[in-house]
Amino acid sequence: MTQIEEVNYEQYKHLVSERAFSGETMLLNMGPQHPSTHGVLRLLLELDGEVIVNAVPDIGFLHTGIEKNMEAKTYLKAEVMSDRLDYMNNLGNNLAYCMAVEKLVDLDVPPRAQALRVILVELQRIASHLVWIGTFGLDLAAMSVFLYAFREREQILDIFELCSGQRMMTTFIRPGGLWRDVPVEFETAVRNFLKIFPKRVDEYEALLTKNPLFLDRLLGIGKLDSATALQHGVTGPMLRASGVKWDLRKARPYMGYEQYDFDIPVRTEGDTYARYLVRVQEFRESMKIIEQALNKLPMGPVRSDNRKFVPPPRSEIGVSMESLIHHFKLWTEGFSAPKGSVYSAVESPRGELGVYLEGDGGPKPHRVHWRTPSFDNLSVVPKLVKGHLVADLVAILASTDIVLGDIDR
Amino acid sequence: MDTKLEPIVKALQEQFGASYEEFRGEVHMFLSSGQIIEALTLLRDKYEFELLSAMTASDYYPQNTPRFHVIYQLSSLAKNITLQLRVPVNGDQPKVPTATRVYETANWREREIFDMFGIEFEGHPDPRRILMPEGTEGHPLRKDFPLGYEEPQFTFNFEEIDLRKPYAKE
Amino acid sequence: MGVEQKLGNMGIVTAKLEDVVNWSRTNAMWPMLFGLACCAIEMMAAQASHYDMSRFGMELMRASPRQSDLMIVAGRLSRKMAPVLRRLYDQMPEPKWVIAMGDCASCGGVFNNYALVQGVDEIVPVDVFVAGCPPRPEALIHGVITLYEKVKGEKFVTPT
């Protein structure tokens, strides 16, 4: 069970060049536990001095079996596992799953719930990019950015705690709407955050964007052109930094995104500096969306009326017999979905997050597959690092913004 | 279905004899494993489906022919349409030709399908397991592979499970 | 002012060796970076400025196991990663302690399946379990202080 196994390099023979086996280049293991690999990622590097000749990623150290475990639970209980996939983007994962369930069973979502979902998901996007900018700075030895970014993130986590009681794994977005309505202090808290945040983004930019050390380390490193990116299935800020203007919020709008007026930052150089600039601009665009959604927030219910799929409120259960029966059936057996499969995708901070959901007439899903963006974003990294130094590898990995929970599921 | 999708579906029907179904606004087309590479190349070059969004498989266990469906989800950025292709595969010796030469992203995705379902991809440059450790027996996402869960410890069986559990002592 | 009052005019303090050694161990315990999944983010938040862990002596997180005393296993441990954990634990010099942070490290958490080790104490001996999914940074700090209480009670000579 816990034997230390001998590494056999025969399995990598076709991936590294022959100079490795003659001893001319060195095989170095950048192991699963490393401060700069953003999680448990193992990279096998073939080095010629300090220059990287080949890099072979080895993943699977965080494989949790979420897809198989979701098949064993009902649709509602399986949603709890979706938070823990891409653990920087909890509400985004919930949204992707709920949209797939709603598409499969043909369930409507009231407009107030749609607007609140947009606000929460955009706040989650800002929180995820804050962790990215913090760890990006930390990897490049700019440690103060980390402390500033986490100070802002605490404010966002306070807002999530206000709504749902939990900082991170909230499971607040449920099929049919939200779990419950947001409290009255929500609007004030979000507006306070929007008041202070633009100046903070300017602070981060003042520290990093024109910094000569930063520019030296990032300009021209890890160039990705759009043809390679599309071949490898790269989406999200990495694709937008290579010149392709593709964002699912604009191309296939969901949850009412067509009502809000925002731009998609695109750059053409494709190097790490371009990816940095794209994500910093995304902070500002997300703020615009939140402000517009908050101004236009309609009144109304936050969950669909369809009692076959959405549990009734507690006040109704004591009064109506039907509500009691619906409540009982939903919490013991769960609702049944028709036979058929759907694929629904949202734009997560890393790219296209898609859910392939297949029902078979019963209360448990037949197959849930998560199309996670970091899986494809990582598969292009071996091409980006060829010919660079090991220090550049650290910068390139930080700029791809991978989350290992997303990759290994 | 989407008007931009109709000529494409018709062309695939004529060239490959593929049937299709529509569900909730999506179009799923069924092809055989001999036709899939040609169809993917045609869709990528002539109809501008640049992005292979997702590639996965699904197991329909008790029936053996077909037992698996390999599913390709294609996305066109230029025309803003999506299409899903499904390839039914038999249960004993499941083999499908590799799509790595058409879309590079299929490299890792096919390794994952091999790891989780045991479907072999002919001509794949790197057929190793990707998520499970080396030397794992079996393929986890098949329906006849057990979930492997541990029995919950309640008060009545606490002692007996406690004795069986392999705690590390030092 | 505390210590100088007891010094007297000779500058000598008497105490039990155990107390002095345990006091010095708790005041500068360096954790090893072993963040695996979501709990690692809360561990990073505990290290950041809002809930500062360097007040408790954990000023820096060492990446190398040879230079650290404490291993905070934060996150879910998969079966592929288990030998790596054991190897890292064996590389740490004595005295060493382990905190299992979060539900997945304590007992397998939400995930009861083939891919995860159901509780890190199947691989390494754990001193303190911190519950939560993920535990708040304050809960982690409470766990660290509980570990300090345990360390302060450690004895060199077992009373016969």
Image (cartoon, rainbow, N blue to C red):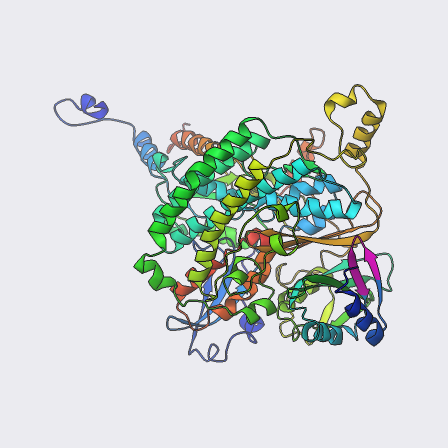
Instruction: Kindly identify the residue that appears in the image at 69 percent across and 44 percent down.
Output: A98
Callout count: 0
Q: Quadrant of the N terminus of chain B?
A: bottom right
In front of the other: A140 or A301: A301
The x, y position of residue A4, in whole percent, is 53, 58
Instruction: Kindly identify the residue that appears in the image at 83 percent across and 74 percent down.
Output: B16
Can you name the residue that lies furthest to the top here? A319
In front of the other: A96 or C82: A96
The x, y position of residue A255, in whole percent, is 66, 45
A378 magenta-colored:
no
The correct choice, above or below, for A328 with respect to B149 in the image is: above
The x, y position of residue A317, in whole percent, is 78, 23
B28 magenta-colored:
yes
Can you name the residue that lies furthest to the left here? C9
The x, y position of residue A402, in whole percent, is 52, 56
Res C124 visible: no
Query: Based on the displayed image, in which of its 4 quarters is residue C96 positioned?
Result: top left
The correct choice, above or below, for A8 with respect to A301 in the image is: below
Res C18 visible: yes
Position of residue C38 in the picture relative to residue B53 (left or right)? left
In front of the other: C157 or A342: A342
Specify the principal SS of the magenta part.
Answer: strand
Position of residue A102 in the picture relative to residue B51 (left or right)? right
The correct choice, above or below, for B124 with respect to A216 in the image is: below
Numbered range of the magenta stretch: B21-29
